[in-house]
Amino acid sequence: MKAIKLMVVIVTCLVSSQLPAADGEGPFFDLEHFLTEKKALIEETLPLTEQEKLAFWPLYDNYMQELVKLLERRTALNKELMNTQKTITAKEARAMIDEHFSIVSEGVNVKKSMLVKLRNKMPDRKILKFFQVEEKIEAAYFYFLSEKIPAVK
């Protein structure tokens, strides 16, 4: 049941990205809606004691601020890739590769930092469950994203 809800949240947010933005600049992703739904899903999926909630949610909010910065960088990189698809130079390709791996590396570091902070606040089984939900959401997001971005020719 929860896996289905997870997919519905992700698909709803991503399908809305097919709609044109109000300024006509192309698709948009309703990030605020996505983040709200994601948080609600985590709250529903991850049963926490009151003490764990007091420790977890501020850490989660900081964690998500860092991940949103990386998501914004990834979005900018993807837009650049889409805009230069046919005219990309070797130098631009190298810069895009470097930026991609910088984002991925920083994402791993953000997750590791969250893990260290959670280890002192919650049992490992709950931490594992949290990161499982995170990975499922991320995998679904990247799957849908991969469908929208064609390979470089």
Image (cartoon, rainbow, N blue to C red):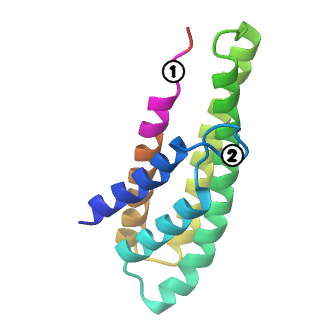
The residue beneath circle 1 is 150
Comes first in the chain, label 2 or label 1: 2
Relative depth, front residue between 149 and 61: 149
Residue extent of the magenta highlight:
143-151
Residue 94 picture location, percent across and down: 70, 16
Mark 1: secondary structure: loop
Residue 113 picture location, percent across and down: 61, 59
Which quadrant holds residue 105? top right
| 86 to the left or right of 126 | right
Which quadrant holds residue 60? bottom right
Q: How would you rate the neighbour count of disc 1 (Cα within 10 Å): few for under 14, some for 14-19, many for 20 or more?
A: few
User: What's the amino acid at mark 1?
Assistant: Pro
Q: Nearer the viewer, mark 2 or mark 1?
A: 1
Residue 122 picture location, percent across and down: 46, 77
The image shows residue 2, relative to residue 102, as above or below, that is below
User: What's the amino acid at mark 2?
Assistant: Glu
Which quadrant holds residue 30? bottom right
| 102 to the left or right of 47 | right
Q: Is residue 120 magenta?
A: no
Q: Is residue 147 magenta?
A: yes
Mark linked to residue 72: 2
